[in-house]
Image (cartoon, helix red, strand yellow):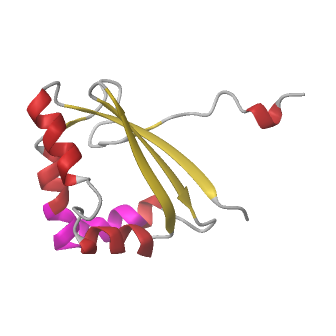
Amino acid sequence: MKPSRHVLLIDLADDAQAIAQYEAWHAAGAVPSAISASIRGAGIEAMEIYRTGNRLVMIMEAAADFDPERKAAADAADPAVQAWEATMDRVQRPLPWALDGSKWTPAELIYSLADQA
């Protein structure tokens, strides 16, 4: 099995102060070590978040055996992750078409240069 790529989107509150706060929370060295350990421990090998306006795009590269449901269950039982998520909830806004109860919305791959002749 090969590693998997996950592309997820979410919005931030359309407010310059909220956006600046979110970026400060994610600056190099600012994310609590327990959060990074939780991400790595779930089999996520690389993660990047990009922003344009108030829209965020997360790109994750995960081990072949990565299980998003197992990660969600572990997160729900981890007080450090729950505290981090509560902080993020202050500025994150699910996309209008997000499934009920979900935050980040997966994007569907519709084009790959590798598939082109």
Extreme front residue here?
A: 28
Name above or below for residue 59 compared with residue 62.
above
Question: Residue 100: where, in percent of width, then height?
Answer: 28, 37
Residue beneath the point at 16% across and 72% down? 79
Q: Quadrant of residue 29?
A: bottom left
Name above or below for residue 51 compared with residue 45.
above
Residue beneath the point at 43% across and 60% down? 69
Residue beneath the point at 19% across and 55% down? 85
Question: Residue 80: where, in percent of width, then height?
Answer: 18, 71
Question: In which quadrant is the C terminus drawn?
Answer: top right
**64 left or right, relative to 11:** right
Q: Nearer the viewer, residue 8 or 117?
A: 117
Report the span colored magenta. Answer: 71-83
**46 left or right, relative to 3:** left
Question: Residue 70: where, in percent of width, then height?
Answer: 43, 67
Question: In which quadrant is the N terminus drawn?
Answer: bottom right
Name above or below for residue 93 compared with residue 71.
above
Q: Nearer the viewer, residue 47 or 84?
A: 47
Residue 68 lies in magenta, yes or no?
no
**31 left or right, relative to 115:** left
Q: Main secondary structure of the magenta part?
A: helix
Residue beneath the point at 39% across and 67% down? 39
Q: Quadrant of residue 94?
A: top left
Q: Quadrant of residue 110?
A: top right
Residue 80 lies in magenta, yes or no?
yes
Question: Residue 48: where, in percent of width, then height?
Answer: 43, 50
